[in-house]
Structures are given as C-alpha cells and as structure tokens.
Amino acid sequence: MNSLAALTWEPQYWSYPFTHLPTGLWTSVLVGATCGVLGCFVVLRRMALIGDALSHAILPGVVIAFLVTNNTGVWGLLLGALLAGLMTAVLINVVSHNSRTKEDSAIGIVFTALFALGLILISMLPRGTHFDLKCFVFGIPEAVTFAEFSLMTGIAIVVLGTITLLYHPLKLISFDPIVATAMGLPVLFFHYLLMGMISATVVAGLKTTGVILVVAMVITPASAAYQITNRFSNMLILAGFFGALSALLGTILAYVLNAPSGPSMVLAATFIFVASMLFSPTHGYVFEKLRKARLKRHIEGEDILKALYKLENSGQTSTRENISKDAGLAIDGLPPLFGDLIKEGHIMLANGQATLTEVGRERAVEMVRSHRLWESYLAEHANIAPEDIHHHAEKLEHAHELADEVDRTLGHPRHDPHGSEIPGKGD
C-alpha cells in the first residue's frame, strides 16, 4: 500500500452468521460504554474538538508503531497511539499558550497536521506492505481477535477504575478548572491523563467503529445523558449505558440490514440522542412544549377568574361574550378552560353563566391584588410610561407569589396609579 488510493473504501458487510461474532460484539459494547463515560468529561469541558483531534492524530503513532514492530500487534499499536495522543495534547497546549491562536484553532492545526503526516507515512510504506487502512478508518468488528477483546477489557477496567478513584478531582476540574487550580490540584496532569485514556480507548476500539466514527461514540452518548440528568454521577452511568446500547443496537442493525457496523453504531447513538432531546423529562422538546402549554392554560384560567371578578363587581352578566372580551380570549377556547376551573372548584355554571365559588373569588382577588401592586411598582420604580403599565402588569400579575414582597417594597399602598383600591391580603 504505497499511495493514497488506500483511502478508497469498499463496504465491509456481514458474510457469516451473527453467532460467529461474539468477540467483536462484546468488544464494541465495551468500547461504547468506556467512550460514553469518558465523553462526559469531554462534553462538560467543551472539548468535543479534542476528541475528534485525538481520533485522527493517533494515525502517525499507529503507523510508526507498525513500522518499528513490523506487525500490527495490539500492544505496539496501543503504545504508538498513546504516545501520539499525548503528543497531540501537548502540542495543542503549546500552540494555544505560545501564540495568539485560540484553542479551537490550535486543535485544528495540530490534528490535521498529524493526520496528514500519518497519511504520508502510509504512502511511504515499502511496496507490498499490508497496512489495513480500511479497518483503521471504518472498523470491522468481525475481525476482532480475542487478544484485542482482552485488551479492551483491561482498558475498560483501568479507565473506569481510574475515574472511580479520582472521581472528585476529575469532577471539580470538569466544572471549574480555575477553582481546582486554586485548590492546588494538578489540572494539567489530569488533562493529560484524560487524553491518554481517550487515546487508549480509541485505539483499542479501532476495529469496532473505526477512527473516523469513534469520536461520535465519545460525544453522542454523553450528550444524550446530559439531556436527561443534572447530576454528574447519573450522567456517567447513563452515558456508559447509552454507549453500550448504541454498540449493541448498531451491531444488530448492521447484521439485519447487511450494512457496515461502525456507521450503524453511530446511527444508533444518534437515535438515542434524538430521543433524549425530544423526550427528556427535564430538558426535552416535547415535555418543554407540554409544560408551556400547561402554563398557558393555567394563565388563561387565571385571566377568566379575574374577568369574572370584575364583571360581578360591576354588575354585568358573566356571559361567554363578556368573559371573552374582558379576558382577551377566544370564545371557542372557553369551554375547556371552564372545565378545568370547575374541576378545581373555582367556578360554577348555571343558565349559561359562570359564577365564582368562594375559593374562586379568593383566587380572583389574589390576581387583582397582584395586578394592581405590579402596576404601582412599575409606575414607581421602572419608569414605564403610564399607558404601558397595564400591559406589563398583565404579564407580571401571574407571578402572584411575589405580591407580598412587592407590597412590602412599596410600603403597603392602598391604591394603584389609576386610583383603584388594592385589596388587602385575604380580602
């Protein structure tokens, strides 16, 4: 292999029964789990480009190790990749700290240079030398040997054990490296330790997803876990689980569709991320939309209570037309809101008219009090034009839990800027 023609890739499909692939399958699962856990530190430290850089920059280390040992033994490749990974981290640090170049630009400069060096070294290999670049770039899990599985098992144990033992300093450095430095922690040592663990995991998993796609196994499962939880310990567990699940589902998908395994694993990881982005209970798009819809409905219900209070106090009939006009709501949207308010015991319906219950009146008075207090506050402290005060107070009144604080700040006023009486608490 003596030219860049080696980059031409012919898809590697499954050619024998799935039951013959337990070694590659379980190696992929270990790679996914380990990458997922390491990815938590990469994601929190906003080092996604570092993961991409390491996955590419280890190429010259692997090629040099291949030349020195004259074979593709996993221990030689691992050592070469580790040295290249650490050299990458050091060079990025040197460039970013000794020039005007920002860290992201330094990452781009270093990893593209090292990757290019690796390609040149491959092109200079003696004629007839077999260096399987397709396996390196795209991964072929069915070619994984038991020795490589054993190596990945050992690396997974070392990585997970190191993270367990150094959990607290690694956590602190990930969230606030400045405080960690002030506390005397060797931040640079932990940075290089993390780079070394990522490099070792990447090279041990070369035959599963390949160097091009392994960065997705570092970033995507951790990003999916980050969508779901705010606790770092839970994030580590979820990221490891998502990484392992991505590898398992991707391997199965590759077998079913007769497709290459590396891309299938990445697609599985991406599917998990999209699902977490949509359905995360805390940060998911769907649940966020549901929360906003419930809040909107709650606010509209409070607007109806306030409108009923005003109509009853002014002696007007509480027909749907009057309620719609005063609350600023469409008539067609009132029935479901009435249903909610009836269930909550705030209103009653009789002869086509709505009336406040005792509980509903208390809630309505609370809204009116909040509105008028906010009007007073805006007029006195916010320098808002008098004609705009009502509009802003209409939005702020729903934060009625702050009404007591506003009341104290204003010195318990009895009238709003329009001269209307402000109800006392419990009136």
Image (spheres, grey):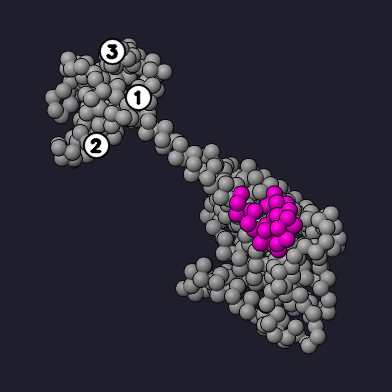
Q: Which mark is residue 83?
A: none
**Residue placed under numbered mark 2 in the picture:** 392
Q: Indicate left or right for 378 with 419 as reference.
A: right
Q: Quadrant of residue 219?
A: bottom right
Quarter of the image with the C terminus in it: top left
Alpha carbon separation for disc pair 3 and 1: 14 Å
Q: Indicate left or right for 6 with 183 as reference.
A: right
Q: Residue at 49% x, 41% y: name it.
A: 286
**Can residue 235 be found in the magenta stretch?**
no
Residue type highlighted by circle 1: Pro
User: Which class describes the residues within 10 Å of circle 1: few (<14), some (14-19), or many (20+)?
Assistant: few
Q: Residue at 70% x, 80% y: name it.
A: 6
Confirm whether residue 324 shows in the render: yes
Q: Main secondary structure of the magenta part?
A: helix
Residue 426's place in the image compared with 77, above or below, is above
Label located before the other in sequence (3 or 1): 1
Q: Residue at 54% x, 38% y: name it.
A: 281
Q: Which mark is residue 351?
A: 3
Circle 1 SS class: helix
Q: Indicate left or right for 159 with 387 as reference.
A: right
Q: Nearer the viewer, residue 329 or 210?
A: 329
Q: Nearer the viewer, mark 2 or mark 3?
A: 3
**Residue placed under numbered mark 1 in the picture:** 335
Q: Residue at 72% x, 48% y: name it.
A: 165
Q: Nearer the viewer, mark 2 or mark 1?
A: 1
Alpha carbon separation for disc pair 2 and 3: 35 Å
Q: Indicate left or right for 28 with 377 as reference.
A: right
Highlighted magenta segment, given as a residue range:
243-272
